[in-house]
Amino acid sequence: MLLLKTSVATGLDTLAGMHQALQSAIKLEHSTIPPYLYALYSLKPGYNEEIRQLIHSIVSEEMLHMSLACNILNAIGGQPNIDSPGFIPTYPGPLPGTVEHGLIVPLKPFSLELLSSVFMVIEEPENPLHFPQQRLMSGEVPETRTIGQFYDAIKQALLAHGKDWFTGNPDLQVSSWGIPAVTDLTSALAAIDLIVEQGEGTKDSPLDPEDEPAHYYRFAEIYYGHQLRPNPNVQPDTPPNQKYIYDGPVIPFDPAGVWPALTNPRLQDYAPGSIPLYACQNFSYTYTGVLKALHKTFNGQPDYLRTAIGLMESLKAQAQIIMATPAALGVSANAGPTFEYLPVLPVQ
Amino acid sequence: MSYLNGLRLHFAGRFQAAPSTVNNDITHFNNATFKPSYQQPQDASGPNGWWNPGGGAEWRLLGCTVTGAWMGGGQAANGDPILGCVVADSDRRAPAKIVDLDPQQQMVSQIWGLEVRICTAAGALLLRGQYEPTGFTDIWDRSHNGGGDSGASSMYQSVLTNLEWGDLRASPFMQALQATAAGPDGRLSIKFNVDGYNMNPTSPEFTRGRIVGTIGPATVDEPKHFVPGRQFVPEAALGSGFFTPTTGLGFCVAQVDTADSCIYLDLGNAVPTTVPGGPMLNQGQLQLVAWVQPDNQNPFFQNIGDPIDYMSPDWYARTAGVVMLPATRALTADELSAVQNNQLGLLLTNGNTRQLTPESPQGLYVRADTFVFRLDAGQTATLDLWATQFGQPLPAAQGPILLQLDPSQLQGGPGEPAVATPTTALTFPAQVQTDANGRATVQVQANDLSSPRDYIDGQVYGLRASLPAIGYDLTDYPLGQWNFVSLLVFDPYTPKEPVTWYDDLQPIFQQYANLYPIMSRFLNLADPQAVWANRELLLMAFGLPITDANTMPVTRDLSGPKRAAILRWLGQSELQMGQPPMTEPQPQALAETAAPTVAGPPAAAPAGAPTGAPRGGKTAAAARRLVLQKP
């Protein structure tokens, strides 16, 4: 379970504090995307198709969550800041806003170990079904917050103080590609519920409002190698953690269908003048371009989203080529795309 | 005005053009005979999918920097912070695309969806502009050693519109440029030359080449894609390459600037190189001359300015081949008179050898501004024709502009469908009068075709303009071999009702899955379930304007009615399969089975690997030109 510093959600009773908290939410939602994409891209074409689709669905929802956080911030008159050098975290490292001694998130090719030690930790709910939970001692002052608590704090503060905050220009709202607009308190609360439930499920069910397993459980499906399905023997008194069971259709994993890509590649790791350096510079330049396109989208030009989506699609083909390229002469590992802020393509 | 102007900047760097080459062979469009090997790179066993079957059509500016800037009147913008700034493509959308018009007209490849950006080295924006798509022209065999596509050079000229300016306070040069482009119609002229293209798949430079270019002012009442100035038209040597001049220089243009009292000459695509993308070839002294032909006296060459310093260090990168003549003083009245009333020439003197590259005959010239068109049946192309003499509007009294079909530069080899037939597919006047500005607008109407090329949609045509005093010499092309209009006319198409996969989409999408293996990285276009599952993305991509970098098909070779049918199918509430044909269509999962082996980058890049000139590029297409197939 990720633990956030309390400082990311302080002063929520003021509009400025709420702006800051939502900007933190945008950064946090984004920060999961590079590691998930890295694992996704590491799956060789034609292999591990079910796993690819599950991870892809999770990444898509992380993008939705980031978009919803932007919409809420715009709805209360803030300005999402997506195009800045510090927006992309350094990998390996803690996700933005999380405690320093907490989870260190790497860029690594897909493996079941990565799934259980990183991705399922990122997505782990406060009270995961099937797993024991860690409760705070009564009266103890919490110094950290889970993601669910973070969003709940935002929600409670909006309920308490936010009814006059929704003065943002509705024309700034992005409402295409399945992203709901946020224009008032009700739609903001619904957006927060969607973020939390897609990520964590609900207290009693692993399913999100679309009846899909929440992210944690989707990763667990891959880990256990079976889809999650309702327990056919459920009784009225069956406890929540027995209502579902990982014994649905098989989700096979073929380790040979993963590119042996580098872990935590940086541009500086590649030889000057080499094919992987050029390709990774192009990738980082394109990724920076995605952030710039999203910044434009959420700062006054909602229609620009389709251009951003087009750019994201071009990332995919680039990454697949990079992952199939040796990192250097005589090295057994393949290259991996770098997620670095690169506003100008270097002289090559 | 135009880039060939006193106020201008030059840039130099690299470019990337990474087309898919499976579609370089027209027979690959035939779904019935397509083989999976066509998606593999060429090897010892055969040409397969030529040299870059995995290409995604990206066209990029790479590491280009501003190498020179001029304030006008020969005054260098020394010390201006624009020097060293970056000329880049878009930092916020997909890269531009390079697209052939057709496998049987590969000599006008267009750049679509290019945004040109000038920024500081740290990325601070100075200028953003949208590049109006255009094809290259004047391709020629530039390199003295090493031919093929790598030895070729060509040029692109267009305009930047929808200009967005950044903080220009530090740069007087950029402020001066901005002042020329005020208002909503503000635009700039941009021209660049590309050569030294690398076709060696084991090199980090694969699909890249050298680019040098110039950006300057533009106005709405001048051509976008050429300079209506003094056109130098070399004669062609015999051979099957692109174009080899007999007199040492390629096509080029000069502009007489009476305000600056000088001549701006653009040699950027005209001086040969020693090797592909290499230094300029020293051919001796290069001098601009007026070819004075007085009554009752022998003609003579009058020097205009000093010899051109084309061999000075870094000349090409610093100037992009643009020179001002005279270099250090104004034209004398005598020189100006000689220039305005006589044919010009570029004289190369090397020992006792003299070679003259002349201006077009009698200084006459005619050209269509936009010269590449795609037309649905019933649509018209509007040709914007400009007739000039000695760079001035040609008076209407000198006669009309002539137009005739000319397929001679189109490419159709043995075993391929015939090009440019039927000739009834286009309706246009054989001649047209010019206005007081030497201009004429002509509508070229596309008529219904009945699939003259069977397995590939539509037909390609060439349309050449000339003048009565020039006529049609289809051997020497006195106004330039490449000076003609290329048109792709699509077959008429009426989809079934409702639109179904088998009746309408399957043949189209199977062809794309065959020809563009890179698509399999996204989805298998030949699989209706995969297409249906991705319909939201596909609806967006097929609905984008053709100018958008992300439009589908990337190749822009789909007619309007077929695009509309695809959009209707994708927009239906349920998957409409229709009835499969009696004979099963081609292997539906071709792209899928081929996916894991899509040509990726090579495993290693041996140091010093030679730059080969594999088959399947422009050189192979140029060798199939009809003009070379005359009995």
Image (cartoon, helix red, strand yellow):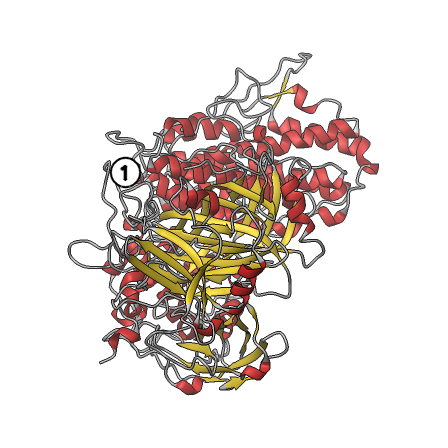
Question: What residue is disc 1 on?
Answer: A256
Residue A247 falls in image quadrant: top left
> Which quadrant: the C terminus of chain B?
bottom left
In the image, B429: left or right of A38? right
Label 1: chain letter = A
For disc 1, the neighbor class at 10 Å (few under 14, some 14 to 19, many from 20) is few
Tally the numbered discs. 1
Task: Give the residue drawn at x 24%, y 63%.
Answer: B35
The residue type indicated by label 1 comes to Ala
Which residue lies at the image location 72% right of the left edge and 47% below the top edge?
Answer: A172
Front-most of residues B583 and B280: B280
The image quarter containing residue A39 is top left
Q: Determine the residue located farthest toward the left in the rendered image.
A: B45
B349 versus B386 height, above or below: above
Residue B401 on image: x %, y %: 51, 81
Q: Nearer the viewer, residue B545 or B236?
A: B236
The x and y percentages for residue B499 are 48, 74
B485 horizontally vs A203: left or right: left
- Corner quadrant of residue B92: top right
Up/down of B400 relative to B507, above or below: below
The N terminus of chain B: image quadrant:
bottom right
Q: Determine the secondary structure under disc 1.
A: helix
**Residue A82 picture location, percent across and down:** 61, 36
User: Which residue occupies the extreme right position in the image?
Assistant: A164
Residue B620 seen:
yes
For the question of whether residue A174 can be seen, the reply is no
Tell which of B293 and B237 is nearer to you: B293
Residue B317 x, y percent position in the rendering? 44, 43
**Residue at the extreme front:** B296
Question: Relative to the observer, which residue lies in front, B597 or B238?
Answer: B238
